[in-house]
Image (cartoon, rainbow, N blue to C red):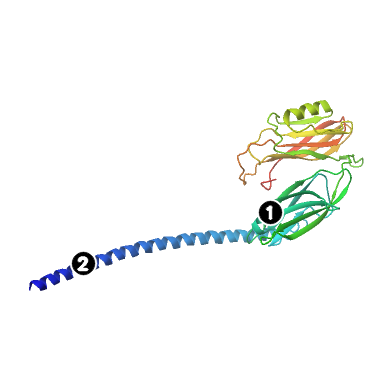
C-alpha cells in the first residue's frame, strides 16, 4: 500500500514536470513566432522599399532615354557609357567638359585626351552608377593650351573588373585652339583663354571683387600676396588679365566661370555665371574661395562685368 502511494506521488511529480516543460516550450514557441512575424514584417518593408527604388530607376531610365533631342540626339544606353558632350569636331582651348551617362563596374568612367601623335595631354576619372540603370556624370579635363591649333581625340572608357583592360571605349575628335589671341572684327567676340580657375587659390585675403591687370607690377604684387607659386609671366603689351573672385563661401556648391567677352568701341563686356548651392544637393561643410582668371588681348577699353547668378545643376557643376 505504501509502495502504491509512493508510485502515485512519483507519477504526479513526473506529470507536473511534463506539464511545466510543455508550458515553457509553448512560451518559447510563442516568442519565436513573434520574432519570425517581426522579421517577416521587416522583410516586407525592405521589399517595398526595393520595389519603390526599382520603379524610380525605371522611371529615371525612361526619362534619360527620352533625352535624344536635348542631348544632341543621344540615346542613353542601359549598360556601358553614353557620351553626350563634347560633340565631334568641337573646338576647345585649355579644358574640355565631358558629360554623359554610364552604368559600369563600380561606376568607373575613365577620361583621356590625346593629340594627333598619341601624346596624352590630360587624363582623369569620374564615377556614375553600377546596377540596373545609368546615371549622369560630368567632368572637366584641364590641359596646357598648345601654341598652335591642334587636332586631338577624347577617349572615354571603363576598365574590366577581371583584368583591368579597357572596355566600352568611345573616341571623339576635337580641335584645340592654339594661343593665338585675336579679336574677331565681324562679331567683336574676343578670344579668351582660361588662366586660373577653381576654389583653392589661397585667396583667403582676397575679398569678393572683379579685377583687371594691365601691367606687370600690379599683377606681380597681387600674385605674390595670394600664391606660393612662381609669378606666371604675362606679356602685358599683348595681353590683359581679368578676374572674378567670390570671396569666402561655405561649401563647394558655389563657383564662378567666365564664359565670353565682347568688345565695342569703348568697352569689353565680360559675361559669365556665379553658381549658388542647389537646394536638392548635399555639400560637405568645406570653406572655398571660388575664382576665375582669364587672359585676353591687350586693351585699354573699360571692362564691364555681366555675371549672372544661377543654381548649380547638377550638384558638381
- Mark 1 or mark 2: whose residue is earlier in sequence: 2
Image coordinates of residue 230 in percent, x first then y, are 78, 32
Q: Under tag 1, what secondary structure?
A: strand
Q: Is residue 184 left or right of residue 253?
A: right
In depth, the one of 179 and 307 nearer the eye is: 179
What residue lies at 39% left-to-right and 61% top-to-bottom? 35
What residue lies at 10% left-to-right and 72% top-to-bottom? 3
Q: Quadrant of residue 182?
A: top right
Which numbered tag is attached to residue 136?
1
Q: Quadrant of the N terminus?
A: bottom left
Image coordinates of residue 285 in percent, x first then y, are 60, 39
Q: Which residue is mark 2?
A: 16
Image coordinates of residue 302 in percent, x first then y, are 84, 30
Q: Is residue 182 left or right of residue 194?
A: right
Residue 219 vs 117, above or below: the answer is above
Q: Is residue 25 left or right of residue 255?
A: left
Residue 246 vs 280, above or below: the answer is above
Amino acid at each position: 500500500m505504501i509502495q502504491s502511494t509512493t508510485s502515485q506521488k512519483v507519477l504526479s511529480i513526473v506529470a507536473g514536470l511534463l506539464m511545466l516543460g510543455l508550458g515553457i516550450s509553448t512560451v518559447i514557441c510563442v516568442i519565436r513566432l513573434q520574432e519570425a512575424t517581426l522579421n517577416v514584417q521587416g522583410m516586407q518593408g525592405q521589399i517595398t522599399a526595393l520595389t519603390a527604388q526599382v520603379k524610380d530607376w525605371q522611371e529615371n531610365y525612361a526619362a534619360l532615354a527620352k533625352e535624344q533631342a536635348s542631348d544632341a540626339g543621344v540615346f542613353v544606353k542601359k549598360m556601358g557609357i553614353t557620351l553626350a558632350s563634347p560633340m565631334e569636331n568641337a573646338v576647345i582651348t585649355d579644358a574640355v567638359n565631358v558629360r554623359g551617362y554610364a552604368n559600369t563596374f563600380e561606376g568607373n568612367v575613365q577620361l583621356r585626351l590625346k593629340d594627333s601623335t598619341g601624346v596624352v595631354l590630360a587624363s582623369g576619372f569620374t564615377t556614375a552608377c553600377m546596377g540596373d540603370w545609368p546615371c549622369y556624370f560630368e567632368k572637366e579635363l584641364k590641359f596646357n593650351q598648345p601654341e598652335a591649333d591642334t587636332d586631338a581625340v577624347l577617349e572615354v572608357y571603363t576598365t574590366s573588373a577581371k583584368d583591368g583592360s579597357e572596355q566600352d571605349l568611345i573616341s571623339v575628335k576635337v580641335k584645340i585652339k592654339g594661343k593665338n589671341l585675336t579679336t574677331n572684327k565681324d562679331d567683336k567676340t574676343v578670344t579668351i583663354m582660361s588662366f586660373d580657375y577653381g576654389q583653392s587659390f589661397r585667396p583667403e585675403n582676397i575679398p569678393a571683387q572683379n579685377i583687371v591687370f594691365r601691367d606687370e607690377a600690379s599683377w606681380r604684387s597681387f600674385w605674390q600676396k595670394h600664391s606660393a607659386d612662381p609669378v606666371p609671366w604675362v606679356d602685358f603689351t599683348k595681353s590683359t588679365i581679368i578676374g572674378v573672385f567670390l570671396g569666402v563661401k561655405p561649401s563647394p556648391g558655389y563657383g564662378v566661370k567666365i564664359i565670353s567677352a565682347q568688345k565695342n568701341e569703348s568697352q569689353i563686356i565680360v559675361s559669365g555665371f556665379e553658381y549658388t548651392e542647389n537646394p536638392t544637393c548635399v555639400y560637405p561643410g568645406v570653406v572655398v574661395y571660388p575664382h576665375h582668371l582669364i587672359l585676353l588681348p591687350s586693351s585699354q577699353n573699360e571692362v564691364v562685368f555681366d555675371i549672372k547668378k544661377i543654381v548649380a545643376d547638377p550638384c558638381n557643376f
